[in-house]
Amino acid sequence: DTQKQWANLYPIFMLSEDIKTQLPEQAKNFATCDELFRSMMDKAHNFTNVIEVCTTDVIRKAMGRKDNLEQMLIIMEDILVACEKALADYLETKRKIFPRFYFVSAADLVDILSKGSDPTAVLIHIGKIVDSLDTFQMIGDSK
């Protein structure tokens, strides 16, 4: 679950400048989680026995941390849940402003919001926002 949550949130909190600006505290917390996750995976990669990694303190020692594997996973889970909640709250405020956003997935909405200043980049999502409209042509400067 932790890996799946991390993989889903990574492009949102690490690659989206809009989210970094709008949710700076959560982006900072996610960066901490990202660093911990990557370090843990880097150290775990050196061991071939998964049972040894999961049941002993080899990861803790390899990482030079006081927390054991379970504690590190709980720390990451807490950060990821908080990031998901903050993101959901942020997206809900945008959906209240423009109700058509309720028809768009969270990932698509983040993409739309992060590219909002470039209308041509948002066109790929237009069919999800407006029924019976697949595309339209922009005339003139899109900026």
Image: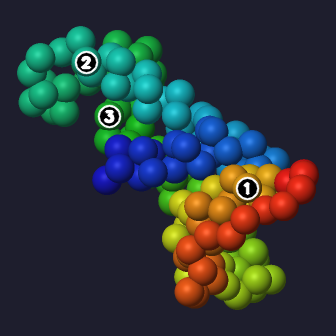
- Identify the image quadrant of residue 104: bottom right
Q: Nearer the viewer, residue 55 or 80?
A: 80
Q: Position of residue 59 (x, y in %)?
A: 30, 21
Kindly indicate whether the residue at mark 1 contacts the one at mark 3 (C-beta within 8 angstroms): no
Left or right, residue 53 beside residue 28: left
Amino acid found under the numbered disc labelled 3: Leu
Res 135 label: none
Identified at 81% across, 48% down, the residue is 21
Q: Nearer the viewer, residue 143 or 73?
A: 143
Secondary element type, mark 2 = loop
Residue depicted at x 70% and y 87%: 99
Q: Secondary structure at mark 3?
A: helix
Q: Is residue 129 above or below residue 125?
A: below
Percent of width and height locating residue 111: 64, 56
* Callout 3 crowding tier (Cα within 10 Å): few <14, some 14–19, many ≥20: some
Callouts 2 and 1 close, C-beta under 8 Å: no
- Which residue does the image show at 54% across and 60% down from the upper left? 107
Give the labeled residue for mark 2: 45
Give left or right: position of 79 versus 57: right
- Disc 2: CA contacts within 10 A as few (<14), some (14-19) or many (>=20): few
Three-letter residue code for mark 2 = His
Q: CA distance from mark 3 to mark 1?
A: 46 Å
Helix, strand or loop for disc 1: helix
For the question of whether residue 138 can be seen, the reply is yes
Mark 3 sits on what residue?
A: 69
Q: CA distance from mark 2 to mark 1?
A: 42 Å
Front-lying residue, 68 or 88: 88
Q: Which mark is residue 120?
A: 1
Instruction: Report the label total.
Output: 3
User: Which residue does the image show at 68% across and 45% down from the upper left?
Assistant: 16
